[in-house]
Image (cartoon, coloured by chain):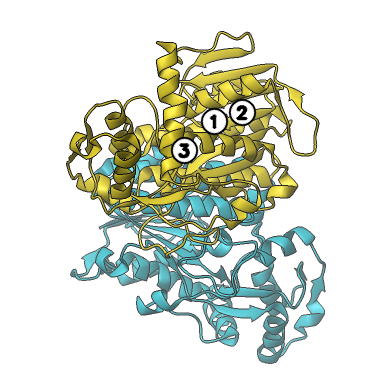
Chain colours: A yellow, B cyan
Amino acid sequence: MRILITGGAGFIGKRLADQLLRDGAFSLQGLEPQTIDKIILFDNVERENAPQDPRVESITGDINDARIIRKVTQNIDLAWHLAAIVSAAAEADFDLGMNVNLDGLLTLLNALRDLKSRPRLVFASGFAVFGGNLPDVVTDFTALTPQSSYGTQKAIGELLVADYSRRGFVDGRAVRLPTITVRPGKPNKAASSFVSSIIREPLAGKPAVCPVRGSTKVYVSSPRRAVESMLLAMQLSEATIGSGRTIPLPGITVSVEDMVATLERIGGIGATKLIAWEPDSEIQRIVDSWPTCVDDARARALGFHADADFEAIIRSHIEDELSRTTRSR
Amino acid sequence: MRILITGGAGFIGKRLADQLLRDGAFSLQGLEPQTIDKIILFDNVERENAPQDPRVESITGDINDARIIRKVTQNIDLAWHLAAIVSAAAEADFDLGMNVNLDGLLTLLNALRDLKSRPRLVFASGFAVFGGNLPDVVTDFTALTPQSSYGTQKAIGELLVADYSRRGFVDGRAVRLPTITVRPGKPNKAASSFVSSIIREPLAGKPAVCPVRGSTKVYVSSPRRAVESMLLAMQLSEATIGSGRTIPLPGITVSVEDMVATLERIGGIGATKLIAWEPDSEIQRIVDSWPTCVDDARARALGFHADADFEAIIRSHIEDELSRTTRSR
């Protein structure tokens, strides 16, 4: 079995690859497990600490370069498409966002279509496809009204994945990911970057900036759950998923002030003192436009699930990242 | 004032241009009427019987050719984007549909953006953006779930027009047109082509084919109403339209058998004898996926309106097309 992960140098891509390498085989619903022969990690940057494993091939390039995308998709059975320009970056540089998030997806879809083998594709979307005057709970039947270029590009991506699948070019699925917290590494250009940094930085004794009000609610998931969901979305058969090819993933709804209070309580540190509250109206606007309550009944019935609570999210971060960092030092 | 109409050789484009030439000036809400200096009719085919008017310039080319699109958009104040590959044609030739309906729109949007004058744009969308398991009434809050590539491309177009407008690149509006009947001319590759031909052909004493069951309901508008709506969508100020830049136009819901019965009654001809009922499961599938009941309260409040009934639609066709054809012979 040959697997492609675009955005393979990103942190979800890394975790996904590491999990697949540990498992050594992948089970599609209704089929025997199949040995993983090759994982191609495609990104525009080199992965740091790439696994020294003969099954892994790291390739760097532009997702919008049809020649290289034809090369990395050759004989591919499964593809996770995680490569993206994140929300605030796509808002700051419209053309870059369109090139990667729209044209890049089309380049990939057309290369997969040309294989004529109907490869399976998981496309990472997000709740930024919603925005504006939303109902209290967003459902599979709620209109997509993105209020950012990133959200627009993800909404278009969902439509394209559905149509390429309906036509039999790929067997695609889109997953709408909640905001992932706690991301390891440094703050990035996502409008949601603070949702991780206000936890991650204080836990490491470092200062963090929170650009939104404490009462702001966010809909979140741990990286663990996100990776589990990415795997499950690939495993499920087409018949199980049904005609709605976009799956809104379960998450938990939490306010920023409750996140910080939880950190204080379980981390035993003066977290609030390390957080500078520096309002940024543009980030507040983008974050406020995202839904905080999602009907996840269909996703749960398919086997997806949320973290137990925000404390569990912090604990999984400590286990997965902080103890690991300590070990590798 | 300089005006661009893409799809300018199509029948809505023709009527729109003729109306604008008769009016000689165009009134934007809140502003004095402005003289129309130039109407550029852009299409991939030459317009038959193009008006001999110094204000009209007919240009043929490919909507996806950035060089020619830069030329036709030069100093444009208003653009109606009507050029499209219709539903059954976009289903039969996926690449052609994507090239015109998606890439062509992007080429136009980017050329208009480069003007930096924020030109006003009306984009012709349709109810094919909906499909599948729809609620009894589709509203502004109903998720877009197209079941055809044409519908997918139109849904993507609405999202792009909204985002390019939000970013201040254009002042765009999308109108979702009901199925237009009675179209003049010959049957085309739209899945909805029969909605016109079962009226038009018998009225001319010619045979017609109906590929769907008589009980099939359709949501329709006359060409007159469509052109009026196109004009109004351009006139309304941004403030009046508000943040929802897609306007679902009012139409009337009628069954195919009621259409035929109305024709028999007012045409005084043996219409049913001229119609061959030849079921086409693919056309039935596409047409069945379109909504037949639309919440048009917002559109009506903005001044858009539907035809009185199906009889009025037939009578307007007779007035506009049949008496005119007679005159010109």
Residue bearing mark 1: A107
Quadrant of the image containing the C terminus of chain B? bottom right
Q: Residue at x 56, y 27 (%)?
A: A16
Residue bearing mark 3: A222
Q: Residue A280: in sight, yes or no?
A: yes
**Pointer 1 local density, CA inside 10 Å: few below 14, some 14–19, many at least 20:** some
| Number of the label disc, if any, that sits on residue B234 | none
Q: Nearer the viewer, mark 3 or mark 1?
A: 3
- Mark 3 — on which chain does it sit? A
Residue bearing mark 2: A111
- Which is more toward the observer, B176 or A56? A56
Quadrant of the image containing the N terminus of chain B? bottom left
Considering only order in the chain, which callout, 3 or 2, is on the residue closer to the N terminus?
Answer: 2
Residue A300 percent across, percent down from the top left = 61, 51
Which amino acid type corresponds to the residue marked 2 in the rendered image?
Ala
* Secondary element at tag 2: helix
Which amino acid type corresponds to the residue marked 1 in the rendered image?
Thr
